Image (tube, rainbow, N blue to C red):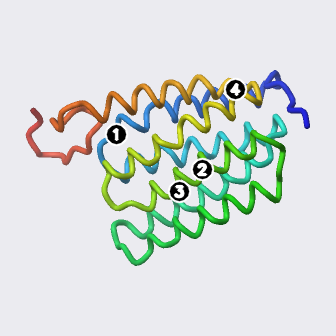
Amino acid sequence: MSFVPATDPLALASAFLAILCLSVWPLFRSRQAMLLAQLAALGWLIIHYALVGAMSAAIVNLLGAIQIVVSLLAGTRPRWHWVGYVLALLIVAASLATWQGMPSAFAAVGMALVAIGRAQVGAQAMRILVLAGGPFWLVHDVLIASPIVIADAACLLIGLWSLMRPAAPNALQSWVPGEKRL
């Protein structure tokens, strides 16, 4: 199995846009804002991974995008969160069906953790589990020599910082017009 280097202009552009989206999602405080940033990232990741031949990664990211759409539509209604757990199983099955060696294993574990994280109703629980999938994606992207490894590292660092920061409002937190900002 060999992967195409990310020298194609479209592969590089999609990687850059994915890096941007992946680097900012942990900064958001609300679950909905985090999910929207992740959805944008997944769109670019699907394109990037497909162009470099990492089909397991492209497919599990497509399943992740489907999960985000369902999560956004379901909101905090717990009866829909089973979809995240079912998709975690589908992610593992998709990785086995498109097996490309160890990169597929790391993509499966990383996205399964992310899927379980997105099934959480609380923003903090979601953040912790989604970030737990980060090291697996970092190894995946090192193995396939993808520039997305930059976003993996940035996302982990920003995510760890966001876990430790106080709960004070900031510019990235949702703001209601007419409400006084601190």
Give how far across and how far down residue 34 sits, in percent: 40, 46
Disc 2 target residue: 111
Q: Measuring from the top left, give residue 120's x and y in whole percent.
A: 39, 60
What SS does tag 2 mark?
Answer: helix
What is the x, y in percent for residue 19?
57, 29
Of marks 2 and 1, the one in the foreground: 2
Q: Residue at the spot x=25%, y=32% of the render?
A: 171
- What's the amino acid at mark 1? Phe
Which residue bears the numbered disc 4? 142
Task: Please say if the residues under marks 2 and 1 sit with CB atoms less than 8 Å apart.
Answer: no
Residue shown at the point (9%, 32%) measured from the top left: 182
Do the residues bearing badges 1 and 3 touch, measured as CB atoms within 8 Å? no
Q: Give the Cα separation between the discs numbered 1 and 4.
A: 27 Å
**Label 3: which secondary element:** helix
Q: Is residue 110 above or below residue 71?
A: above
Q: Which mark is residue 115?
A: 3
Dot placed on the residue nearer the N-terminal end, 2 or 1: 1
Q: Residue at x 8, y 40 (%)?
A: 180
Mark 4 to mark 3: distance in Å? 22 Å
